[in-house]
Image (spheres, rainbow, N blue to C red):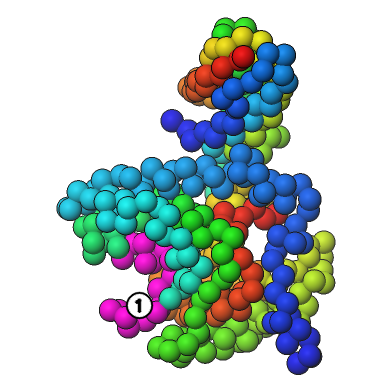
């Protein structure tokens, strides 16, 4: 089993590689990828003036290309707050603290849109989430959660996504569960969704109680997943079945 | 207004076959689903799409409830004259959305 885990860790496999040719084609062509509907909305938000400062994202950050590489390293430790933040939380922090505007609702279309737009700037870059330095204890907590059995089915993330990745759960292939394409367009959802939504799906699937949307544990788990995906490239906005 | 992605070449040679690709954000609610309390969610789909080239119809489509959310259409047309390609989506509630694209044929 140890051997299997180290093999999985050495060769991370993106969900893209296991998607059907039709789904892959949909992701490959920006004109057919429905995620770009959200990217388009995100680009508009980037230039939208708002809040008490009346500034837009572009006023401070300039061209969106300045965001290149950002999505690849999130979740990341925030020195001011003293704990890690997901990309969504970081965007909302900038929105409330710098722009003086109201935070975007979690899971809402606007937050998905701006996150997808920022994420797109890093597309093709290697995942570079850091488990080192002050992020270490949070990473370790995320790893612990990944290995913790949950729910009435009493399964951990690891049991499916490390030990049985590549095998099948009923008709569906079990992916390794990497976060490199989020937020992504899922055909089953008929819409865009965050990594949190996907994790919530999994946890309700094992009949457990999902993390609260603002739970620090959730950030730690996302941080661990980000590090675990080292070796893959950012695919945002990906398309998955 | 719904968000739309349109992909049409800006230029084409006369007689060239061009591909027109359009994607619109829409829930395409089938009318078959129910809420948790058993209420039927009313049908709300795009039921018609029309594409014209300088007013001449290129494609007219009737859409039905089995079509997925955010419908994507791809079709071909022969470039003949420069002008405006107009695309109109008609919603069940009567709302329409029209998007225009210009093309130069040489």
Name the residue rendered at 23%, 50% in the picture: A55
Q: Is residue A10 toward the left or the right of residue A82 in the image? A: right
Region in magenta: A77-93
In the rendered image, residue A215, in percent from the top left (x then y), is placed at 43, 75
Residue A120: in magenta span:
no
* Quadrant into which the C terminus of chain B falls: top right
Quarter of image, res B20? top right
Quarter of image, res A4? bottom right
User: How many callouts does the rendering have?
Assistant: 1
In the rendered image, residue B67, in percent from the top left (x then y), is placed at 68, 34
Q: Is residue A91 above or below residue B24?
A: below
Name the residue rendered at 66%, 49% in the picture: A27
Q: Is residue A161 above or below residue A60?
A: below
In the rendered image, residue B71, in percent from the top left (x then y), is placed at 63, 34
Name the residue rendered at 64%, 34% in the picture: B72
Name the residue rendered at 71%, 82% in the picture: A10
Say which residue label 1 marks. Answer: A78
């Amino acid at each position: 089993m140890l051997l299997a885990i180290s093999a999985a860790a050495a060769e991370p496999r993106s969900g893209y590689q296991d998607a059907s040719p039709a789904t892959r084609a949909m992701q490959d062509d920006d004109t057919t990828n429905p995620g770009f509907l959200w990217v388009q909305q995100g680009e508009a938000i980037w230039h939208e003036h708002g809040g008490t400062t009346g500034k837009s994202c572009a006023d401070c950050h300039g061209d969106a290309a300045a965001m290149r590489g950002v999505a690849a390293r999130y979740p990341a430790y925030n020195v001011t707050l003293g704990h890690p933040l997901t990309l969504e939380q970081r965007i909302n922090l900038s929105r409330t603290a710098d722009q003086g505007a109201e935070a975007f609702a979690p899971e809402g279309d606007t937050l998905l849109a701006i996150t997808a737009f920022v994420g797109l700037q890093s597309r093709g870059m290697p995942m570079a989430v850091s488990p080192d330095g002050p992020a270490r204890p949070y990473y370790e907590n995320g790893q612990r959660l990944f290995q913790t059995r949950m729910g009435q089915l009493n399964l951990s993330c690891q049991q499916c996504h490390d030990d049985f990745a590549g095998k099948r759960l009923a008709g569906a292939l079990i992916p390794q569960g990497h976060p490199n394409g989020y937020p992504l367009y899922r055909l089953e959802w008929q819409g865009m969704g965050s990594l949190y939504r996907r994790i919530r799906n999994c946890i309700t699937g094992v009949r457990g109680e999902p993390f609260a949307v603002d739970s620090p544990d959730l950030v730690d788990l996302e941080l661990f997943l980000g590090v675990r995906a080292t070796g893959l490239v950012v695919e945002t906005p990906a398309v998955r079945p | 207004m719904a968000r739309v992605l349109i992909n049409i070449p800006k230029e084409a040679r006369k007689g060239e076959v061009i591909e027109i690709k359009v994607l619109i954000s829409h829930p395409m609610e089938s009318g078959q689903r129910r809420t948790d309390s058993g209420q039927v969610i009313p049908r709300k789909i795009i039921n018609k799409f029309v594409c014209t080239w300088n007013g001449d119809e290129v494609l007219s489509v009737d859409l039905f409830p089995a079509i997925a959310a955010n419908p994507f259409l791809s079709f071909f047309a022969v470039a003949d004259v420069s002008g405006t390609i107009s695309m109109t989506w008609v919603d069940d509630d009567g709302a329409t959305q029209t998007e225009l694209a210009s093309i130069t044929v040489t």
